[in-house]
Image (cartoon, grey):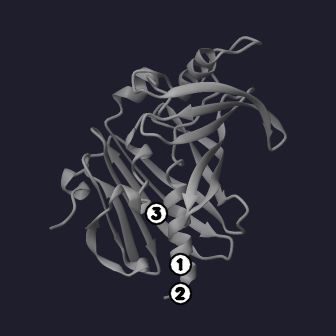
């Protein structure tokens, strides 16, 4: 089997742990000069459209196009529905892979990896896809109640602009770093420490082209790569649907 499509699929699957997260709008309360975590998070959520609107979101469907650094193109669709249902479809050259979570367990179909029948994904199999993303509103909404720990790890420049660096230790045991632009309060970058084939590395997502959809603002351009690796994926989000009617059967593993 050609290893390039498989590498592209694996990178995309990891990348989509952090994309399509609602972004920020220009109207927001500004944190103080000595900003606290609570102030930064409050400003960020207000800028996204408000915690109430995010919590009222019942389902979402996002479709887009993924372009690899060598010019290969794939189509991607991601669907999330409360409570905790997740489905990611990745189509390359007419072949569709599916990564899903039915609210209780993960499953997948991965033809590019030689897996043509639906199969449950054990936790140790690296099947992290869908775990973080099942939280439709994002981890910063009611983060304490969810059992997450958020700390301010300082400031760092992102593409020449200053950003707050938030460390998120998620209740499930993973850690991510969100970089919140100090001027716009957009999350302009997210880093995800990951184990890839037994080696510790960092998946980096950069967000831009923020647009409003139904009162929430989403990044429509995402660039993602694994640190110290040459492959780069550029994701162009073409359509975002809020509260579409989704059949729960789509999230269940076919028997």
Residue 214: which quarter of the image?
top left
Instruction: Identify the secondary structure beneath mark 3.
Output: strand
Residue 159 visible in the displayed image: yes
* Image spot of residue 230 (x, y percent): 72, 69
Q: Furthest residue to the bottom?
A: 1
The residue that appears at 63% across and 20% down in the rendered structure is 40
Depth check, front residue: 16 or 128? 128
Label 3 neighbour load within 10 Å: few <14, some 14-19, many 20+ = many
Instruction: Identify the secondary structure beneath mark 1.
Output: helix
Contact (CB < 8 A) between labels 2 and 1? Answer: yes
Q: Is residue 140 above or below residue 212?
A: above
Q: Is residue 180 above or below residue 231?
A: above
* Image spot of residue 45 (x, y percent): 54, 24
Instruction: Identify the secondary structure beneath mark 2.
Output: loop
Label 2 neighbour load within 10 Å: few <14, some 14-19, many 20+ = few
Residue 65 visible in the displayed image: no
The residue that appears at 67% across and 68% down in the rendered structure is 231
Residue 210 shown left or right of residue 146 in the figure: right
Q: CA distance from mark 3 to mark 1?
A: 14 Å
Residue identified by numbered label 3 = 76
Q: CA distance from mark 3 to mark 2?
A: 20 Å
Residue 55: which quarter of the image?
top left
Q: CA distance from mark 2 to mark 1?
A: 6 Å
Which circle's residue, 3 or 2, is located before the other in the chain? 2
Residue identified by numbered label 1 = 5
Residue identified by numbered label 2 = 2
Query: Which dot, 3 or 2, sits closer to the camera?
Result: 2
């Amino acid at each position: 089997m050609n290893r390039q499509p498989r590498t592209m699929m694996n990178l995309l699957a990891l990348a989509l742990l952090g994309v399509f997260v609602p972004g920020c709008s220009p109207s927001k309360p500004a944190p103080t000069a000595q900003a606290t975590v609570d102030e930064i998070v409050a400003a960020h959520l207000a800028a996204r459209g408000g915690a109430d609107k995010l919590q009222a979101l019942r389902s979402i469907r996002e479709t887009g196009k993924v372009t690899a650094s060598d010019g290969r193109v794939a189509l991607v669709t991601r669907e999330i529905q409360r409570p905790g249902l997740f489905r990611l479809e990745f189509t390359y050259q007419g072949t569709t892979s599916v990564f899903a979570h039915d609210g209780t367990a993960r499953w997948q179909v991965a033809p590019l990896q030689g897996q043509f029948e639906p199969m449950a994904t054990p936790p140790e199999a690296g099947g992290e896809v869908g775990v973080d993303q099942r939280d439709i509103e994002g981890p910063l909404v009611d983060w304490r109640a969810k059992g997450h720990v958020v700390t301010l790890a300082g400031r760092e420049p992102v593409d020449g602009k200053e950003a707050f660096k938030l460390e998120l230790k998620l209740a499930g045991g993973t850690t991510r770093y969100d970089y919140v632009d100090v001027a716009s309060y957009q999350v302009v970058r997210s880093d995800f420490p990951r184990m890839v084939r037994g080696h510790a590395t960092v998946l980096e997502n950069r967000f831009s082209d923020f647009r409003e959809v139904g009162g929430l603002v989403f990044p429509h351009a995402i660039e993602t790569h694994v640190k110290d690796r040459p492959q780069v994926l550029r994701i162009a989000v073409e359509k975002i649907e809020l509260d579409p009617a989704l059949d729960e059967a789509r999230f269940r593993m076919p028997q």
